[in-house]
Amino acid sequence: MEKAMLIVNPSSGKEKGKVYAEKARKALFRRYREVVVKETQKGGDATEFARQAAQERFDVVVAMGGDGTLNEVINGLAEQENRPAFSFIPLGTVNDLARSLGIPLRPDKAIKALETAKKRTMDIGKIGDTYFMNVLAAGMIAEAVDKVSVEQKTRFGSVAYFAEGLKAFSRHELLDFEIKYDDGDWKGEAALVIASLTNSVGGMEQWAPEAEVDDGLIHVFIITKLGIIDAAKILPQIALGTLKKADGVMYFSTTTLEIDCTEPEVKVNVDGDPGDTFPIKIEVLKEHLEVLVPR
């Protein structure tokens, strides 16, 4: 391995991207002959930089930013014939993918780990013509979370998501879903539908403890009960890793997933950002990327 691209979102993590970029560049130079640094200026830049790295046959692409930046990089790599290895320095609010891969949440430790990191494979999900790395959420709670502004994320972190979620709980709103998966279909009202490729959702690392980043499966949770009391009962089971056994929760794993909703304007939340409107079709691309993780 000789050639690395470092893609930096300078505004991520309360503008920590600017602080850590030079440290990451020096760490990569200890392992690679050439290191090219690219700074994003607008949405879509990270996708274009990653696509460029693949076409120019870079050996590795390292992203420095939040989940949005990582999602863009993965979308830039996913369809390329020559896909460089992928890694990242987490600077986001929740950092679910880092939690699932064992990448340190402290940027300085994640940078240090790059020097001796090893390769492993990782699944990604596909929705239409776009790709995701971690989780898809649908329902009024997901809609509420979409309303969290960049300023709120920067100032309050994951507390901002929690506050908006509580507002949705208090309104007792349900949506009608029709869901098709490998072994059947499901129709009914639900407060929240979560489709995850990894064990960590919303910073809760025991959400789907059976999930592996390369198992080729989508882990689906349908939460049919809504309310503050229901949430209070479910939260301890999330902590114990037994959410799928909770009252009012349906769980299954599948390789393909179709979701439709009676509310045509409702959007799904994909890796923490608003995605497509319904209906949607999801598939897993098993072991599609190589990712560098700590030894």
Image: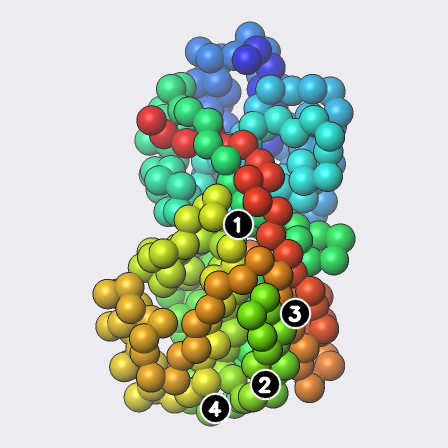
Of the two numbered discs 4 and 1 on the same chain, state the one appearing first in sequence.
4
Q: Which mark is residue 71?
A: none
Residue at 35% across / 40% down in the picture? 102
Q: Are marks 3 and 1 in contact (CB under 8 Å)?
A: no
Identify which residue, 141 or 196, lies in the foreground: 196
Residue at 36% across / 63% down in the picture? 207
| Residue wearing tag 2 | 187
Whole-percent x and y of residue 51?
72, 33
Q: Are marks 3 and 2 in contact (CB under 8 Å)?
A: no
Of the two numbered discs 2 and 4 on the same chain, state the one appearing first in sequence.
4
Q: Residues within 10 Å of mark 2 (few under 14, many from 20)?
A: few
Res 279 quadrant in image: bottom right
In the displayed structure image, the side of residue 239 where residue 156 appears, left or right: right
| Residue wearing tag 3 | 258
Q: Is residue 108 above or below residue 249?
A: above
Distance from disc 3 to disc 1, alpha carbons, whole Å, reads 16 Å
Q: Quadrant of the C terminus?
A: top left
Residue type at mark 4 is Arg
Q: Is residue 262 above or below residue 179?
A: below
Whole-percent x and y of residue 287?
55, 40
Of the two numbered discs 2 and 1 on the same chain, state the one appearing first in sequence.
2
SS for callout 3: strand
Q: Is residue 47 above or below residue 269?
A: above
